[in-house]
Image (spheres, coloured by chain):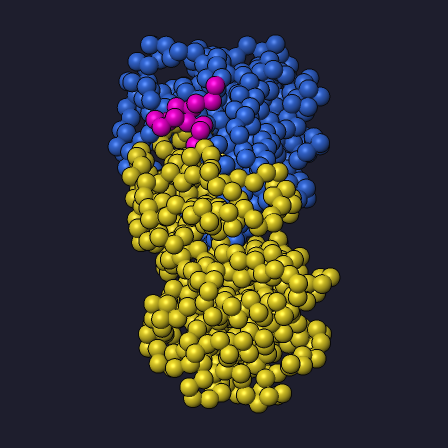
Chain colours: A blue, B yellow
Amino acid sequence: MLSFSDGDEAYLAELAEYVAIPSVSRDADPATMRRAATWLADQLGFAKARVEATGGHPAVIGEWLRAPGAPTALIYGHYDVQPTGDLSEWDSPPFQLTRVADTVRARGVSDDKGPVYIVLKVMKAFLAQEGVPPLNLKFLFEGEEEIGSPHLDGLLASHAEALSADVVISADGAMWRPDEPSLSLGSKGLVSMTVTVNGAAEDLHSGRYGGTVANPAHVLAAILASLHDSRGAVTVPGFYDGVPALPATRRREIAAVKFDERAYADGLGVSELAGEPGYSTLERLWERPTLEVNGFEAGGKYTVIPHLARAHISCRLVAGQVPTGVLAAVSGFIQARPTMGVTVSVIPDPGLVPAYSISVDHPAVRAAREALNAVYPGEAVLFAKIGGSVPATTLFEERLGLKTLFFSFSTSDERLHAPNEFLRIKRLGEGMRAWEVLLRELAMRLVGE
Amino acid sequence: MLSFSDGDEAYLAELAEYVAIPSVSRDADPATMRRAATWLADQLGFAKARVEATGGHPAVIGEWLRAPGAPTALIYGHYDVQPTGDLSEWDSPPFQLTRVADTVRARGVSDDKGPVYIVLKVMKAFLAQEGVPPLNLKFLFEGEEEIGSPHLDGLLASHAEALSADVVISADGAMWRPDEPSLSLGSKGLVSMTVTVNGAAEDLHSGRYGGTVANPAHVLAAILASLHDSRGAVTVPGFYDGVPALPATRRREIAAVKFDERAYADGLGVSELAGEPGYSTLERLWERPTLEVNGFEAGGKYTVIPHLARAHISCRLVAGQVPTGVLAAVSGFIQARPTMGVTVSVIPDPGLVPAYSISVDHPAVRAAREALNAVYPGEAVLFAKIGGSVPATTLFEERLGLKTLFFSFSTSDERLHAPNEFLRIKRLGEGMRAWEVLLRELAMRLVGE
């Protein structure tokens, strides 16, 4: 067994350096992104890690091999983070690691800088204490995960040989709950878009022009309201195309999961749960596609007819749905509405992502289960799915022919993508130990080329 | 005839001083508001003008009498302005008077600082050239017009004697079009409110929580979409209560107004006009109540389920509608919808305003028509209505028993309440001449006490 004896204080000091780099892929300048990539590459100097251009934000690629013919795992993660959003909603500066009880708060600390940091420490422990890794390892950390990984496909295509492996282990993709070990056997796909309704050239006084022109806010509200029925099912024709009926076995499996709806609702601060009729909460979360309005904006508070109204929509997809088909269905449905003198446009975000899944019998899943059993003895490992989307998984499958195991020590309640993102400190030590066991188990279970 | 020979440059330099005071009644500090009031009172020193406390932003009150028993006009206006909104939408600093071709741009220059400035110059011309005004004059300039005049009622009640007069002449309330003289025989009422939908305690990741909770943005969109039918009529039960059928005579009168719908649409930048079915554009603008969503906001652009969605709604009322009844109808309709675990609140803005009207046969309307004929010879004076709301008119009627004549040289296309508000420079000279004639005509037509 490796020794991880640095202690939380040393870990947190180092992690603080990493999160202090505001690597917001959506709008950071190239120098900042490169600084984060370089920090990561420097940590993995022994693995010949290098910052690799991609056409967008650079990636970090490295390899640390044990022996020819040994099985190879490609470790994946990302160094970019979500935008902070409104700074006034943060209780401390988002890029300053702030300890709060048994957690640390910062943008990206849970998604995905903390989980990647765990990997770095495990590597250094193997290097210092055993000199070699238990199996061949390759590394790929990208800087565009939060914007849909637009250049990952090209990178994988041009580096297919260098990145060849037997499996991908992703340090991204959170555990479902903080109080039990879980593995995710899939992730939802993602299609998202911006809907813009343009009216007059300027905001108009609601009295002096009221009653003469269509109001873009009304048109957009009508569009958004038309996307679901009154009970919460998506009404867009074609949206559910290809979604298989939920097998009875899976329904039973999900029904057996201990899940306290009341506590879940209380935890979120809502009086009741809601969603597509005919499915339980967990069925909706894991097995059913969703369409959410992520936000909208128009005008101001006062008495104008706004000249523009805009909304962002994201659809989370399940296996069977074709991303381009969903995009065409939603976009076509929106644009087919009569608009009385205003114009409606739908601009898809780059990076359509199909849903992804891995079998419970895959050797990497078995190895991961062993690793979690070692760190959380006596606790059954729950098989969940990730409601979020990890576009990289599909690309690994398509470009490298590899399945991806999600093995993150982030937890899905840690305000990922929201203000006051945090990470549980104890996950650092647990994650290091688990990664050690995982790699040893993979070395035994995977068959190298 | 008075001589107005200062010239535009001198006028604009003085007006620039006035608009430079950022007297935004919604959020300026008290010292700034007082500075604007004091500037105005200083200009009217000969009229014993003073800054008067109101419980909110102060008012400016003065009087300049010709003779006991002569008729008396109370001149009304306001020194407060709308918020600037997003500064990036302004082409020059909003509180710096900026000349652009034959206009000047600044927040408040058209609503209502320019029109009030015209009054000041006419008073000074009478003072310098004739020593006395043509009739008794009283002055009332408030600092809360843009927030619904919340303290005006109390001020009128406590100063009823000091403000007693035969008619009110309002320097607020724009002309309908720039290319013909018009008088407004009424204004719409106003009821406005903020609708807030609260969901979870925080924004939630749309993947990790999608399908489990109601989305406040969906609920708000459904609420807003339910307020109108697909053709543009308001669907709220009770909204149209008390609205009289439009008389055939008025319909004919409106049909006779030269109005180029295509040019109007082009001017606003929309491909077609729209509104309540069964009425022409001008009928809707002048004679029909409206309900407009002034703006909304929720979440951000990216992949969250927003925890809160908010919209502001304003209703413009016509004679016959009871403001409290409209508020109750809209608020009740909104709150009666099922919401699936989120909460909906409706907070009315202060200052409900009923609609107002003055007869075409009122002596002040006749005097005003003469004044416009003098300044715009050969051009027929059009009788329009103000789509906007001037709460003061109702209060003058209720508290002082006075009708109000709108006599402003602002024009309704001058981006009132929007970025890049402007005033046509030629209106300064035209307005001064017209006010002179108006006051002389009033002196002859009004019967003093």
Foreground residue among B195 and A294: B195
Which quarter of the rendering shows the N terminus of chain B? bottom right
- What residue is at 42 percent from the left and 43 percent from the top? B309
Rendered location of residue B213, percent (x, y):
36, 32
- What residue is at 34 percent from the left and 26 percent from the top? A231
Above/below status of B269 relative to A434: below
Q: Is A235 inside the magenta-drawn segment?
A: yes
* Left or right: residue B7 compared with residue B223: right
Q: Looking at the magenta stretch, what is its main secondary structure?
A: loop
Which quarter of the rendering shows the C terminus of chain B? bottom left
* Residue B243, visible in the rendered structure: yes
Q: Is B117 inside the magenta-drawn segment?
A: no
Rendered location of residue B297, percent (x, y):
47, 45
Foreground residue among B151 and A261: B151
* Residue A299, visible in the rendered structure: no
Above/below status of A121 relative to B419: above
- What residue is at 48 percent from the left and 14 percent from the top? A241
Rendered location of residue A70, percent (x, y):
59, 14
- What residue is at 47 percent from the left and 86 percent from the top? B65
Foreground residue among A138 and B285: B285
Rendered location of residue B325, percent (x, y):
30, 50
> What's drawn in magenta, residue-wise?
A224-237
